[in-house]
């Protein structure tokens, strides 16, 4: 039997380098994970440079690559993808930014770049979207809340560029910067001017907003300004359906991954309790994937928690999270008619608390897949598997071939 469907399970930042606290082994090598190991044993294994050898991937560029969209062609900055992930429909040519709500003190310096870790900012974001008026500059704007203190801004209008700075000084106790154009082009100057006008007007709206008045009464920091960064112009993405003939969905807590899925035409499948942390609703996400694959051809399922633990440098927490993921995976091993791909978007070594270019382990499991002699899902074991060392850009072609969706090259 040949599979017809694909679930791509991206265990974000799951792979690592040897960790001293784990006796020189990686969290994947130490963790007890019978289901992940069973999948490796029954499937074909390898290691993968998600973008290319020696290229240190962001989660955005690597996910684009895994989905078969060359980031060199398609990546125009994080802003447009975050905006899409926050629910703003980005059209080609719109300028997107990722934003933080932040707190300014009496003297105009930043007291907190995250506004006291505010969440539930929908009322503030709606007030900004409705109240800020850039029409004298012939610009329309969209503004939407993300997770926690995060949000996104999108600008639409003629003659806008994306080559502008951030107003975020990246430290507290200083005055936010003005947004500056990074070229002498009128398009970049116009965007920078629009951003500065936006920030001014947003601050007026936020200062008088009942949510902030209440926060001050309760001794909480008000969200009285917005920091913008990651400017980018939305490009044109051929949809998954056009490119591969596959319908699909994306399940992820991170707005960035949701945004990437949506720009390539994958439907966002929300799951309550999906937080992107080690406390996320794993059962809910896996149940949703199993439910949705019945009426879709492809599901991208991202589980973020291991990356968070790695950015904190916590190898023990990472190992424990891997063990927790494993306890929920069994239903995925029983799907008929479906390939399950286990992989990661990049390595996040706890020793450097950031992404590295080390290749990630990859397993393809399902009907009709040739197997190899690998018995465990970890960095070293998978390196001796039958897939050998591949690039992320090869993953979709290999999967499409396994579900019989490729065309013969030649006669
Ligand atoms: Zn990632
Ligand atoms: Zn990360």
Image (cartoon, helix red, strand yellow):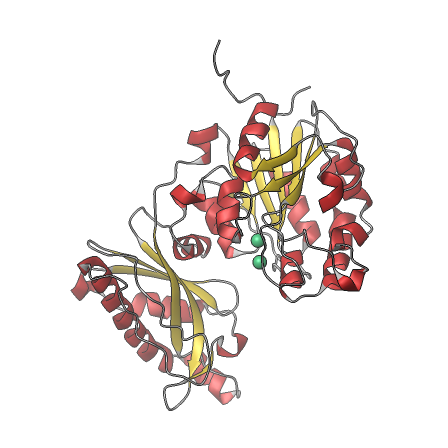
Image quarter for ligand 2: bottom right
Between 40 and 19, the residue placed more toward the observer is 19
Indicate the position of residue 355 as horizontal and vertical percent values.
58, 57
Q: Residue at x 61, y 60 (%)?
A: 275
Relative height, residue 140 to residue 291 (above, below): below
The quadrant of the image that shows the N terminus is top right
Percent of width and height locating residue 102: 44, 76
| Residue drawn where x is 41% and y is 71% of the image | 124
Q: Position of residue 40 (x, y in %)?
A: 75, 37
Q: Is residue 124 visible?
A: yes
Nearest to the observer: residue 384 or residue 301: 384
Above or below: residue 263 compared with residue 280: above
Q: How many marks?
A: 0
Residue 314 is drawn in which quadrant?
bottom right
In the image, 105 versus 63, the foreground residue is 63
In the image, what residue occupies the spot 47% across and 47% down? 260
Task: Identify the residue at the far bottom of this view.
Answer: 106
Q: Position of residue 271 (x, y in %)?
A: 60, 52
Q: Is residue 378 visible?
A: no
The residue shown at (65%, 21%) is: 2
């Amino acid at each position: 039997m040949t599979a017809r469907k694909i679930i791509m399970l991206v265990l974000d930042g799951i792979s690592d380098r040897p960790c001293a606290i784990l006796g020189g082994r990686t969290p994947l090598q130490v963790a007890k994970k019978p289901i992940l190991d069973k999948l490796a044993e029954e499937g074909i294994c390898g290691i993968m440079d998600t973008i290319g050898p020696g290229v240190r991937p962001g989660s955005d560029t690597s996910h684009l690559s895994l989905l078969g969209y060359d980031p060199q062609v398609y990546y125009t900055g994080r802003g447009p993808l975050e905006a899409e992930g926050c629910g703003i429909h980005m059209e080609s040519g719109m300028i997107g930014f990722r934003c933080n709500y932040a707190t300014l003190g009496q003297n105009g310096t930043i007291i907190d770049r995250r506004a006291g870790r505010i969440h539930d900012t929908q009322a503030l974001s709606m007030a900004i979207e409705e109240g800020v008026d850039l029409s004298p500059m012939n610009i329309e704007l969209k503004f939407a809340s993300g997770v926690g203190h995060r949000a996104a801004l999108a600008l639409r209008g003629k003659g806008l560029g994306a080559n502008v700075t951030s107003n975020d000084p990246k430290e507290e106790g200083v005055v936010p910067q003005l947004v500056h154009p990074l070229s002498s082009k009128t398009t970049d100057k116009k965007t920078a001017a629009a951003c500065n006008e936006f920030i001014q007007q947003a601050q007026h709206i936020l200062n008088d907003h009942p949510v902030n008045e209440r926060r001050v009464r309760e001794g909480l920091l008000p969200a009285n300004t917005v920091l913008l960064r990651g400017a980018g112009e939305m490009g044109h993405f051929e949809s998954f359906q056009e490119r591969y003939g596959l319908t699909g969905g994306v399940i992820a807590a991170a707005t960035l991954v949701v945004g990437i899925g949506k720009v390539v035409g994958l439907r966002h499948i929300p799951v309550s309790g999906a937080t992107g942390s080690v406390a996320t609703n794993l059962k809910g996400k896996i149940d949703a994937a199993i439910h949705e694959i019945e009426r879709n051809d492809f599901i991208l399922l991202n589980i973020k928690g291991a990356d968070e633990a790695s950015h904190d440098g916590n190898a023990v927490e990472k190992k424990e999270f891997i063990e927790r993921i494993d306890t929920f995976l069994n239903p995925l091993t029983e799907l008929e008619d479906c390939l399950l791909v286990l992989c990661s978007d990049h390595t996040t070594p706890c020793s450097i608390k950031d992404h590295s270019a080390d290749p990630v382990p990859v397993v393809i499991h399902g009907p009709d897949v040739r197997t190899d002699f690998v018995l465990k899902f970890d960095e070293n074991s998978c390196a001796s598997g039958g897939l050998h060392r591949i690039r992320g850009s090869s993953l979709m072609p290999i999967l499409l071939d396994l579900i019989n969706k490729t065309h013969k090259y030649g006669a």
